[in-house]
Amino acid sequence: MSVIRCTWCKLYTSSYLSCNLYLHIFMTEIPQDFFKWDVKQRLTLLEATVYWTGELVTGFLTSTFSISRVQATKDIALYLSLRPDNLRYDRSLKRYLITEQFKPLLITGSPQECLQVLQASQSAAPPVVTLMSNLPTVEVLASPTRHIDVAVLRPVLQAARFGLVLEIGYQSMTSQEPAVRKVQPHTLVFDGWRWHMRAFSYSHNEFRDFVLARIHQASVIGKPEKLSPVDALWERQLTVEIGPHPGLSDSQKQAVERDFGMVAGKCSTTVRAALLSYLLLSMRIGKDDYQREAMVQQIVLLNREELQPYLAF
């Protein structure tokens, strides 16, 4: 749940907003200089919050931007003057709710935009390099993106944010036909290739991973009747040690050690037990890494015995 909780405030109140790398995700029907910079960021946060979570509390703006309640109210009034049919105030809940007529003004509302923001918000450091000039030409390969339906992503985000239960239609690769599952998601995970949600499956009575692109239908069915158990694999941290393939020559081993910044022939990284298989897959490490051709494999898992209880192979 923590991945979703403050994503938008992390992004829009950080130096990311100074970087053209992220500004390209915003679309607007009004002139770029129509708003002051700070006002546009607050309105963008307002719109994104409502669109992806379905609601907005005035106090969220005041606490995120350290502005007065009066200023936050003015921002909401300004937004409503531009998109009067996007929000409605619920007096009983004391918050603004999204309407069925919602039409984005400052964001695209695409799943790719939202997931890009989620990924950027978890970056270890802001991409300051994008502020530099006189940089060399760069070409970045873009892998094909998996299609994720907005009608799926929005309830998934809302359920993860507010601790709600979902009913999803899911096509598992271990089943020939799709099935309906009752789940409670708590975190979205990007493994470098695809997005999935870590969720407690009431259908299986255990925590499982559900690939977002394989969910063809999702709807919120309410609050859980009881708290889901602790996700032991998620909470457990493991140390993964890798080193050069023993079949490499000494000079080749030294090259691999430099590649990964290894010390004394190894390097270590920490990963949640629930994500161990994704990390090893990204490094092409499997049960046969020692048997594979050294020039193809290049790196191997050194502490396999220690990690054996958590390995999927």
Image (tube, rainbow, N blue to C red):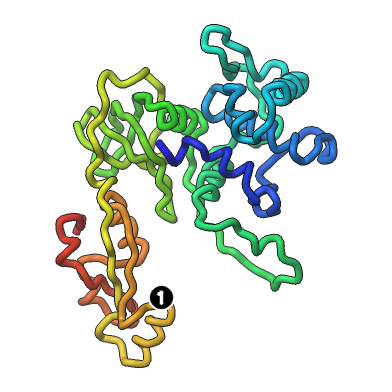
- Residue 180 visible in the picture: no
- Residue at horizontal 23 percent and vertical 33 percent from the top: 229
- Residue at horizontal 54 percent and vertical 38 percent from the top: 111
**Residue 45: percent from left, percent from top:** 63, 34
Identified by mark 1, the residue type is Phe
- Residue 299 visible in the picture: yes
**Residue 226: percent from left, percent from top:** 25, 21
Name the one closer to the observer, 304 or 1. Answer: 1
- Residue at horizontal 34 percent and vertical 64 percent from the top: 269
**Residue 237: percent from left, percent from top:** 28, 54
Q: What element carries label 1?
A: helix
Name the one closer to the observer, 99 or 71. Answer: 71
- Horizontal placement of 227 versus 258: left or right? left
Q: Is residue 114 above or below residue 313?
A: above
- Residue at horizontal 31 percent and vertical 83 percent from the top: 264
Quadrant assignment, res 113: top right
Name the one closer to the observer, 69 or 42. Answer: 69
Q: Mark 1 points at which residue?
A: 260
Q: Classify the position of the C terminus by image quarter.
A: bottom left
Quadrant assignment, res 283: bottom left
What is the number of callouts on the image? 1
Outermost residue to the top: 92
- Horizontal placement of 12 versus 79: left or right? left
**Residue 231: percent from left, percent from top:** 25, 40
Name the one closer to the observer, 110 or 258. Answer: 258
Quadrant assignment, res 268: bottom left
Q: Counting other residues with Cα less than 10 Å from the Cα at mark 1, is it few (<14), some (14-19), or many (20 or more)?
A: some
- Horizontal placement of 87 versus 162: left or right? right
Q: Is residue 284 above or below residue 312?
A: below
Q: Classify the position of the N terminus by image quarter.
A: top left
